[in-house]
Structure formats: structure tokens, C-alpha cells
Image (cartoon, grey):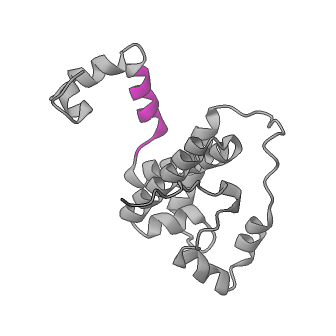
Amino acid sequence: MAKPTKSKTLPKASKVRLPLPAVVADAKKRKLPKPVRAGDARVLTPLTEKGTGADALIMDRLWQVVEQRRAAGDADRSHSARLMARGTAKVAQKLGEEAVECVIEAALGNRDATVLESADLLYHLLVVWVDAGIRPEEVWSELVRRQDVSGLAEKAARPGGVIRAAGTRKLP
């Protein structure tokens, strides 16, 4: 009979050091343009401080900024432009990475890190929208349309409805 092994716990998120992606490692080796270095030098304010004027309109304003950066196409000065210049697949991949990071922090119960990762996720979602030519009003309209519809009823109304949504033919 095999000897039972001790279950290992994950290290605290603050102590986990993941290797830098090649793109980031390469960027650290070469000298970045001055505006980029200046942006990197900024420090985020602590999460405990309440921001003033914080509301959902930031999504519309941020979408406009990302759209302006896409139109300008200056990949040396704009992360948004650089990301979109790499193509739709990379834009979508980055959104997926940010979603996973947000899920991990939420699952670990790291509230502050979840707030930071949520902001990253929303930003990258906006980049996906700009890349796909989707305006925020289109998404807001769809949310309004769904407002008084039960999520279960909405899924059931789709072709294949509940069975496809559940991913199984075995219903509880």
C-alpha cells in the first residue's frame, strides 16, 4: 500500500514569482521611449484611498481613449496601439490571460488584487471591443434588453437552450 502524501498548500500570492513573458523581458533589456519610461515610473495610489468622481462613465471615456490610440497607431507610445498592432488573436489572448488572473485572485480571496485584476480585465475587454469595432452603447443596449429577463429563461430561449448551456443532457 502506498504511503499517503501530505497535501501541499499553495504559497501566498504575494510570494509567488512567475517568470516574465518574453515580450516583457525583452522590453526590459532595450531602452524604452521616454514617455513609456515616465508612465512606468508612476505609482498607483493605495486601494484604501477613495477616488473622487469614480463611476461607470469611466468605461465610455476609456473606450474613447483606446479608440484614439488605435486610430493614431503609435505602437511606440501606446500599449493599446501596440497590442492591436499584434492582431486580433493577441488582443483576445490578452483578455483571456487577464480573466484567468482575475479568477485566480478572486478564488484565493485576495480582494485588493481582485480589484486590480478586474481593472486590467475591463481595460482589455475594451481593447477587444475597439479591435472588433464594437461601441460601448451596443453592449449597454444588450444589457438593457436583458435587464428584466431571467438568465435561465434567456438561456432556455436559445437554440438548444438549457441542455447546451448545461453542457450535459443530464438535468438535475
Please indicate whether residue 149 sits to the left or right of residue 17 in the image: left
Residue at the spot 82% in from the left edge and 47% down from the top edge: 46
What is the total number of numbered labels drawn onto the structure image? 0
Residue 63 visible? The answer is no
Give the residue at x 80% y 62%: 42
Q: Residue 52 location, x and y as percent? A: 80, 34
Residue 161 found in image quarter: top left
Q: Quadrant of residue 171?
A: top left
Residue 144 lies in the magenta stretch: yes
Residue 3 placement (x, y as % from top left): 44, 60
Residues 31 and 166: in front is: 166
Q: Main secondary structure of the magenta part?
A: helix
Nearer to me, 66 or 121: 121
Residue 17 belongs to the span the image colors magenta: no
Image height of 86 relative to 44, above or below: below
Q: Residue furthest top?
A: 148
Q: Work out whether 143 lies above or below 20.
A: above
Magenta-highlighted residues? 134-145
**20 to 146, vertically: above or below:** below
Q: Residue at x 56, y 56 (%)?
A: 8
> In the image, residue 123 lies at what x, y percent?
56, 49
